[in-house]
Image (tube, rainbow, N blue to C red):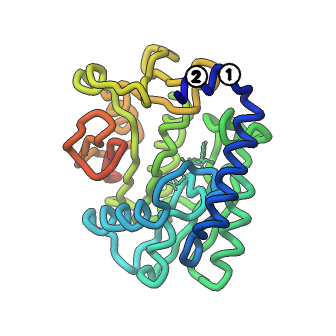
Amino acid sequence: MKTLLKKVVPLPLRVELKKLGLAWLDWRDPVEGKRVPSRKNTFIGGGDFVGVGNDFFKTLKRHGLRPDYHVLDIGCGQGRMARPMVGFLTGDYLGMDINADGIAWCQAEYSDVPNFEFQPMDVYNSRYNKKGTQAAEAYVFPVQNERFDTAFLTSVFTHMLAKEVETYLCEISRSLKKGGQVLATWYLLDETSRASQKPHLDFAYEFDPVSRTTVKSTPEAAIAFDIGFVKSLYEKAGLKISTVEFGHWSRPDSSYMLQDLIVAQKI
Ligand SMILES: C[S@@+](CC[C@H](N)C(=O)[O-])C[C@H]1O[C@@H](n2cnc3c(N)ncnc32)[C@H](O)[C@@H]1O
């Protein structure tokens, strides 16, 4: 049905219809809770905004997050992962993203939380910021060396190209204290995931020798990387991988998370 609709209804009309549908849902069943965007005004994808944030907060704590930490959230979107940390974190939080509207929304929503800051990044991405003037592969994070205890990226490397990811991992390493930790989600290609791809997340197109995408014309829609390549990037950046947890996109019973998670420490 979805495929048929895609063929019959032109994209601009589909976009408008989706907006109307979401506005109707917002009217019929308004989203509840502070710092939760309405369905119509979210750009980070559907799903349970509050539940996903709470689950990832548990993951952060399971991996040692402490209240006094300095935390960096790269590609923070609309603060889905920041939200549960309010009231817990006595250190500080910096969220950065290339979507200026999302950052402006977070700045307004968190204006009463003094230890939370949100900063826009002027970086190009074909899906999330076509107006960006700087290339991600040459971008220097506007942060001091060794400022953070923990950095994380949820569903961000899944929208970036190989060279960009390489740069970001080096920048993360520079920004972390020695022993500091980075948690990042990925779509990792190994024997199992290559064999178990689902129609709704089919990395059908080879983008380059180390990555595949679901949409040929907009590769940043969703990108999966060869696991060996990803591990080599961590090593190059001086980050030692301690955990790889596979998500249910490729291992249906393995995790609450859709995507794979890599946890690593700065050496
Ligand atoms: C699917 S959303 C996830 C947002 C947030 N991390 C979360 O889990 O709620 C992907 C986010 O990555 C951001 N993004 C894409 N490319 C980026 C880049 N090169 N640097 C920083 N953020 C980027 C997008 O603007 C978007 O907010």
Q: Is residue 118 visible?
A: yes
Which numbered circle lies on residue 4?
2
Please determine whether, in this image, residue 184 is positioned above or below residue 161. Answer: below
Residue drawn at 32 percent across, 29 percent down: 227
Please determine whether, in this image, residue 78 is positioned above or below residue 221. Answer: below
Please determine whether, in this image, residue 38 is positioned above or below residue 203. Answer: below
Please determine whether, in this image, residue 1 is positioned above or below residue 179. Answer: above
Which numbered circle lies on residue 8?
1
Q: Residues within 10 Å of mark 2 (few under 14, many from 20)?
A: few
Image position, residue 90 (x, y; %): 45, 83
Residue at disc 2, secondary structure: helix
What's under tag 1, amino acid-wise? Val
Mark 2 and mark 1 in contact? Answer it, CB < 8 Å: yes
Q: CA distance from mark 2 to mark 1?
A: 6 Å
Q: Residue extending furthest left?
A: 253
Residue drawn at 47 percent across, 51 percent down: 153
Image position, residue 244 (x, y; %): 25, 43
Image position, residue 58 (x, y; %): 31, 67
Residue at disc 1, secondary structure: helix
Q: Quadrant of residue 129?
A: top right
Image position, residue 20 (x, y; %): 72, 50
Residue drawn at 32 percent across, 59 percent down: 179
Q: Residues within 10 Å of mark 1 (few under 14, many from 20)?
A: few
Q: Is residue 142 visible?
A: no
Q: Quadrant of residue 29?
A: bottom right
